[in-house]
Image (cartoon, rainbow, N blue to C red):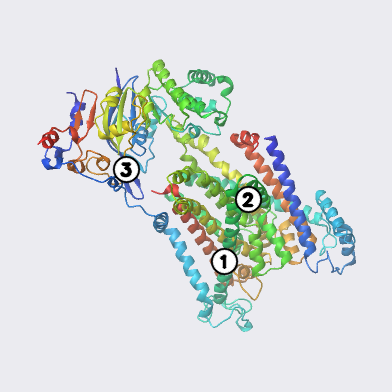
Amino acid sequence: MLKYTIKRFLLMIMTIWIIATLTFVLMNAIPGSPFNEERTSNEAVQANLEAHFNLDQSPLVQYAGYLKSIATFDYGPSIKKPNDSVNDLLSRGFPISAELGIISVTVALLSGVVLGVIAALRHNGIIDYLAMTIAVLGISIPNFVLATLLIQQLSVNAGVLPVATWSSPMHMILPTIALATGPMAIIARLTRSSMLEVLTQDYIKMARAKGLSPMTIIVKHALKNALMPVVTIMGTILAGVLTGTFVIEKIFAIPGMGQYFVESINQRDYPVIMGTTVFYSAFLVVILFIVDITYGFLDPRVKIHKEEGN
Amino acid sequence: MEKILEVNDLHVSFLTYGGEVKAVRGVSFDLHKGETLAIVGESGCGKSVTASSLMKLIPTPPGKISQGSIKFKDRELVNLSDKQMRKIRGVDISMIFQDPMTALNPTLTIGTQLTEGLKQHRNISNKEAKIKALEMLDLVGIPYPEERLKQYPHQFSGGMRQRIVIAIALICEPDLLIADEPTTALDVTIQAQILELFERIQQETNVAIILITHDLGVVAKVADRIAVMYAGKIIESGTKHELFYEPLHPYTQGLLNSIPRLDKKGEKLEPIDGTPPDLFSPPQGCPFTARCPHAMVACEKVYPPRYQASEEHYGECWLYDERVKKYQSS
Amino acid sequence: MDQYTVEKEKQQDPRQESIPSEWFEKVDRDQSNGESVIRPSLSYWQDAWIRLRKNKIAMGGLIFLILLGIMATIGPYLTPYSVGGITLANQNQPPSWDHWFGTDDLGRDVFTRTWYGARISLFVGIMAALIDFSIGVIYGGISGYKGGRTDNVMMRFVEVLYGLPYLLVVILLLVVLGPSLFTIILALTITGWVGMARIVRGQVLQLKNLEFVHASKSFGAKTSRIIKKNLLPNTMGPIIVQMTLTVPTAIFAEAFLSFLGLGIQSPFASWGTMANDALTTILSGHWWRLFFPAFFISATMFAFNVLGDGLQDALDPKLRR
């Protein structure tokens, strides 16, 4: 297990390094970006840029400095907002985005698992078809369509819930639904199929042959095994939710990091794009690492397997 | 000896996409205390379905027992509810599955899996359950049972796992143990060990065993009586001795000719040509007709009558009908 | 005798008594007859097609996609309007006989633009699936087939790419390359093939060692026969399903990018850009501008998803009966 953890950790560092390098190379490749010829109109901004990115030095020095600043979580200044650094934006926006993300993932996970298990137990019944139709719809409707639909129906027409912002629990309902539906659908489908698979396993037959009650069999024998695949896709789910926040924050005017990021793309605020991409990528890669290691602890088979040097 | 199981004219079928598969078509047999009955046949002949339906463990739907009776200690099982069956499963009748690699839950410890049945059925404390579990592990020959209880299935070899599965099956001291191909997935040397274990356990506990297998070597070692299944029917049944030395049915003869024997050196092995019929539309006559070297017109048209060679031994084949001898000699 | 024996006798077929004696003639048969009892065997693809056809929802998806393909081809020619034809006098007209799906804020015909958008969205989706497929099959195939060190190195690389957050990389690339049809497809596939490569490799590895392949070889089957009868049906299932599910992912990604201003640029239309341009209509009430592109994105993704599910069931050799 230790060996595996170390290996997995090194892989994580390497992935972050690749992303950082990729961002650096790409940003320097853009014609007309402040990183090669064009100077920004604002003198103060230009000075900030030059100081942070060592623009007067050779590319190699720039690259070394860039890696160092990433390792120390210093993402440099913004071009369009002279008074803000990328770190300022992150410290203002990220907590809000994180809140939206965590609430949505929790909702998606709970409702998805429940829906999937019920569907599997009522395999080929009406409830199964209903749940899976909801799930396929959830996967098929893009979150921005769902978000506008929700606003139009529940806020504008019915006036039940507030249209935008993130100021009270009532304000959080619609963005959460819009963001959580897609992941919920994916989790529900996966839970269902893995539950169905587990239910055909010999150890379930064996549990039945022991005369255990259906409830014991489902909770004790089936659910834990069925949830293993769900744990493995949590990384992907989180990545989806994270990019989803860009869209949802823009539509609901939530002042999170996603909104700053979309703004920076539209304004071609390169340091912000770079900083956010690297920060979010590193964030996701770390989560992926944690998920993998957790999986090793949940599934007793993994430990031995990895110890044997696999 | 006390008769504990009586199966009569059992029919089991499965509704599938393609139609109704009649997997078991009128199977009858009985079993006494402490006896081992082997049900032999090729894969798909209905022997595993027969075994599962004795405990009513066939998935319903699509499967169902469409006809017949299963009497366990004079109690009819066919019309019992699942809740009533649960009191019988694991307590009176236990089952062992083919593949010990998949029969144990990978995420629960051996100790949990051993004792959960016991705790479900008997009102006992954790400590008592643990003592019983240690006793069982000892019985099936697992060294260091104390430490082993806390381990997970993947930490055991295949043979060890099968021993644990057997321990789980026996922990509530059942009267009947159904073993569905218990040695098929194991190495030959481990196979022998497990079979010896069966014999020892039977001596110690007097449990009746139904052994489902396609391996005549296994049968020769442990069975008292043998029933040969083909296409959902028992086509021949008798004591081990009768069946091995005076097989009646051409299929049984074919089976015996297709296994290598040390005592008949140099003799050619004869595989049985062809494959069993499709059970979507079983033939109305004898199902073996298409592969039978002695097939007659009658075999195709009408299912053969039973020929009783001795009290225990019968075969269902036209060859033994008196009219055949009369016709073919004339 | 006891009751048991009596019951046994009841099972006997009465016809057993009345058999004409000539039926006891031995039948002469050649050996092949033994096999003839088996039901007519269908090829893998015939069997899969029969099962897919029984799945009404999946067939509905397939029919929808065929119709969509037809409309994407001929739709834009059914009206006198062009994709970018701005008529400021006709701003935000609701659906009418002149403009079946209404017009947008620049007076462009939504009907024409919807089918034009269908072309773009389907093109992006299908191209992404095809490119992923080509790279994935070659890369995964080599990796799995060669095995050993090659496999190890190739899979390390895949693992690293797999760890990269897909949409963030796509965004970064498009910021640099500038959005166009070509760069969008490029960005979507540059890391997108990894999933396919993994699946192909897994399939190849699994099949390389399967017993039935050895069995066919030892029976002297020709390599081409092994590939056609055994390998193809067993590998193609998951690959086809993966392709079917790549299309909606790419369509969604394109819509997402449009939303960030990195999609297909005006005057050209994709469903994503149309929906994004129309987001402001939540309050103004010009619902048709959002409804049509949003409906077709959702319906197309739905169709591909249910078709993929249906194919998954139909192509699974384990479920074959």
Q: Amino acid at mark 1?
A: Ala
Q: Are marks 1 and 2 on the same chain?
A: no
User: Chain letter of disc 3?
Assistant: B
Q: Is residue B27 above or below residue A80?
A: above
Q: Secondary structure at mark 1?
A: helix
Q: Nearer the viewer, mark 3 or mark 2?
A: 3
- Residue B120 can be seen in this image: no
- Residue B42 can be seen in this image: yes
Q: Amino acid at mark 2?
A: Thr
Question: Residue at 82% across / 63% down in the picture?
Answer: A81
Residue B272 % position (x, y): 31, 38
Badge number at residue C121: none
Name the foreground residue: A22 vs C30.
Answer: C30
Q: Secondary structure at mark 2?
A: helix
Q: Secondary structure at mark 3?
A: loop
Residue indicated by mark 2: A236
Q: Residues within 10 Å of mark 2 (few under 14, many from 20)?
A: some
Question: Residue at 50% across / 52% down in the picture?
Answer: C235
Q: Amino acid at mark 3?
A: Gly
Badge number at residue B274: 3
User: Chain letter of disc 1?
Assistant: C
Q: Is residue A134 above or below residue C80?
A: above
Q: Is residue B10 left or right of residue C265?
A: left
Q: Nearer the viewer, mark 1 or mark 2?
A: 2
Q: Is residue C181 above or below residue B201?
A: below
Name the foreground residue: A3 vs C174.
Answer: A3
Q: CA distance from mark 1 to mark 2?
A: 25 Å
Question: Residue at 70% across / 48% down in the picture?
Answer: A285
Q: CA distance from mark 3 to mark 2?
A: 51 Å
Residue indicated by mark 1: C294
Residue A251 % position (x, y): 66, 62
